[in-house]
Image: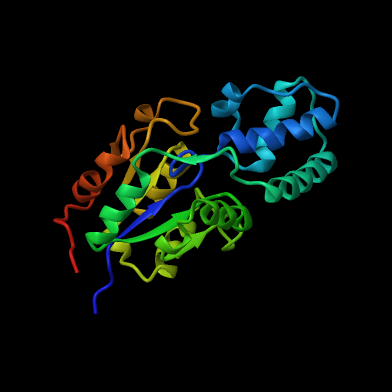
Amino acid sequence: MSLPPIVVFDLDGTLAETAPDIMRVLNLILVREGLSALPLERARELVGAGARALIERGFKASGRALDGETLERLFQDFLALYAEDTASNSHLFDGVLDALDTLAADGYALAVCTNKPILHTRLILAHFGITERFAAVAGRDSFPFFKPDPRHLTLTIEAAKADPRRAVMIGDSRTDIATARSAGIPSICVPFGYCDAPIETLEPDFVIQHFDELPQAVERALGLAPVRP
């Protein structure tokens, strides 16, 4: 029996608007350390490279540098605080559920490949009730490799028991594009996520403005007609 084609999704800024909760936890730490909270509008420049980078960027934006020991302590604090409430202020982007339904009905396996720790990833997916839609879920700590290492993506595809020759990566950042490109897999990006530059300037294979466009973009990216069971 042939392996199914697969659509692999990033999480933060791709499937879900998670910045409100990420920034809430960052601000808890900033205020506790005697600094002012940062506005949600700063999320695009701060979020997207992992919790350590987030904390470093948050303190730099507040005018304070961090030594390695303090950064590690705050990183562990962040992980614990975030696990207590990962998604109460977060939401799936409009059209995500319908797009997942359509892709699944057309015979695609679905997976998540994110640099968020697997604990928080699973908590968020469970909060939205979509865990069972994915044949594989991989976080930053699921394998010895993480994005932009292409093995993070290829091992996720392998875990989903899908065809790496008929795979596409859906993301919102230069990391997602670089990972897919290194793996020889086409990328489709959304422009409303967490990226430090307009996503079109980073030259993904396709850009969609709404998840309604995703099934057709996947077909174009893979050169496939719908693969119905």
Residue appearing at x 17%, y 57% in the figure: 226
According to the image, what is the colour scheme of the structure? rainbow
Q: In this view, does 61 lie to the left or right of 121?
A: right
Residue appearing at x 51%, y 54% in the figure: 125
Q: In which quarter of the image is residue 162?
A: bottom left
Asked if residue 55 can be seen in this view, the reply is no
Asked if residue 124 can be seen in this view, the reply is yes
Residue appearing at x 33%, y 53% in the figure: 100
Position of residue 4 relative to residue 119, above or below, is below
Number of labels in the image equals 0
Residue 128 in percent (x, y) is at 50, 51
Q: In which quarter of the image is residue 7?
A: bottom left
Residue 170 in percent (x, y) is at 37, 46
Toward the viewer: 151 or 208? Answer: 208
Q: Is residue 213 left or right of residue 143?
A: left
Quadrant where the C terminus sits is bottom left
Q: In which quarter of the image is residue 190?
A: top left
Residue 159 in percent (x, y) is at 44, 69
Residue 65 in percent (x, y) is at 79, 27
Quadrant where the N terminus sits is bottom left
Residue lying farthest left? 225
